[in-house]
């Protein structure tokens, strides 16, 4: 009733239609929760169920962004996608925090892609709130990941294979800030892109449980590569790379 009323009033009463759609969309996860309780959906089944529920919410709010030309619904779309990916990570039993952060890294990259689409569809002002929400999400998850991998470094029970997920988080972080700088030039984006690349060698080596000597050598080699890369970028004719 709320959803149908919203669509029926869209042309004649845009504001009430917008309000009705908000109520309609908020009722969907509430109804989904009632269904989950009625059918006693638990465990992996619950994670799978809620993943699809929030994928549905992502679709609903994407439609609402287009229908109402709404910046608000573009933000809720990113939130729904992020929650859906978190439930996907929950499908893996005993998954560490790093897998959840990796899924959020993917949603941040998807958010940047959505920002570009919104800019083409409307303008930069329309897409700005979503852009800065993706930036806030990315810096938060990298901060959490930083303290997480410092904790895991001395944790004997942490499986070496999960360091690949940690490495991927920071690799995606570097890509995220490269793309951010491409979309909106800024020193802080370039600095964060380079900072995100700095621990990659150390994180990846932890997959093989290296000695401290091997880690020290890897940092030395990685630092030399950074230095040479800087000189190489400065030597390019394309001036847009000089700032890196």
Image (cartoon, helix red, strand yellow):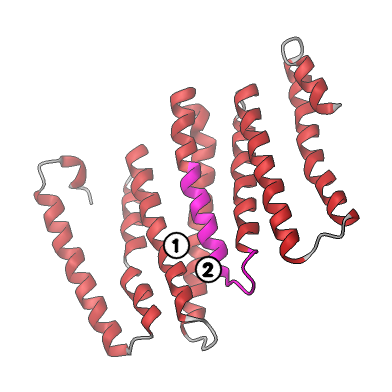
In magenta segment, residue 93: yes
What residue sits 50% from the left and 61% below the top? 102
Question: Magenta span: helix, strand or loop, mainly?
Answer: helix
- Indicate left or right for 115 with 4 as reference: left
Which of the numbered marks, if any, corresponds to residue 181?
Answer: none
- Indicate left or right for 25 with 75 as reference: right
Image coordinates of residue 86 in percent, x first then y, are: 62, 58
| For the residues bearing labels 1 and 2, Cβ distance under 8 angstroms | yes
Specify few, some or many for label 1: CA neighbours under 10 Å numbering under 14, 14-19, or 20 or more: many
| 37 relative to 78, above or below | below
What residue sits 27% from the left and 89% below the top? 213
Image coordinates of residue 227 in percent, x first then y, are: 16, 64
Image coordinates of residue 12 in percent, x first then y, are: 75, 9
Name the outermost residue toward the top.
Answer: 12
Specify few, some or many for label 2: CA neighbours under 10 Å numbering under 14, 14-19, or 20 or more: many
What residue sits 84% from the left and 27% below the top? 2
| 214 relative to 82, above or below | below
**Start-end of magenta stretch:** 90-111
Identify the residue under disc 2: 98
Identify the residue under disc 1: 169
Instruction: Assign a secondary structure to mark 2.
Output: helix
Nearer to the camera, 241 or 56: 56
């Amino acid at each position: 009733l709320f959803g149908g009323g919203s669509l029926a009033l869209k042309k004649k009463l845009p504001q009430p239609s917008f309000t009705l759609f908000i109520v309609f969309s908020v009722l969907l996860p509430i109804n989904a929760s009632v269904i989950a309780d009625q059918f006693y959906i638990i465990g992996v089944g619950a994670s799978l169920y809620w993943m699809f529920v929030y994928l549905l919410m992502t679709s609903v709010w994407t439609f609402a962004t287009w229908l109402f030309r709404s910046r608000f619904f573009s933000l809720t779309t990113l939130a729904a996608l992020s929650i859906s990916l978190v439930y996907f990570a929950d499908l893996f039993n005993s998954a560490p925090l790093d897998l959840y952060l990796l899924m959020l890294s993917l949603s941040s990259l998807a958010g940047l892609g959505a920002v570009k689409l919104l800019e083409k569809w409307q303008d930069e002002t329309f897409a700005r709130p979503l852009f800065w929400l993706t930036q806030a999400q990315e810096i938060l998850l990298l901060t959490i990941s930083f303290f997480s991998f410092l904790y895991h470094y001395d944790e004997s029970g942490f499986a070496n294979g999960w360091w690949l997920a940690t490495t991927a988080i920071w690799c995606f972080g570097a890509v995220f800030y490269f793309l951010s700088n491409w979309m909106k030039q800024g020193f802080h984006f370039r600095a964060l892109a380079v900072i995100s690349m700095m621990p990659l060698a150390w994180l990846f080596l932890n997959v093989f449980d290296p000695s401290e000597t091997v880690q020290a050598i890897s940092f030395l080699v990685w630092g030399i590569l950074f230095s040479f890369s800087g000189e190489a970028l400065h030597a390019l004719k394309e001036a847009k790379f000089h700032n890196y």
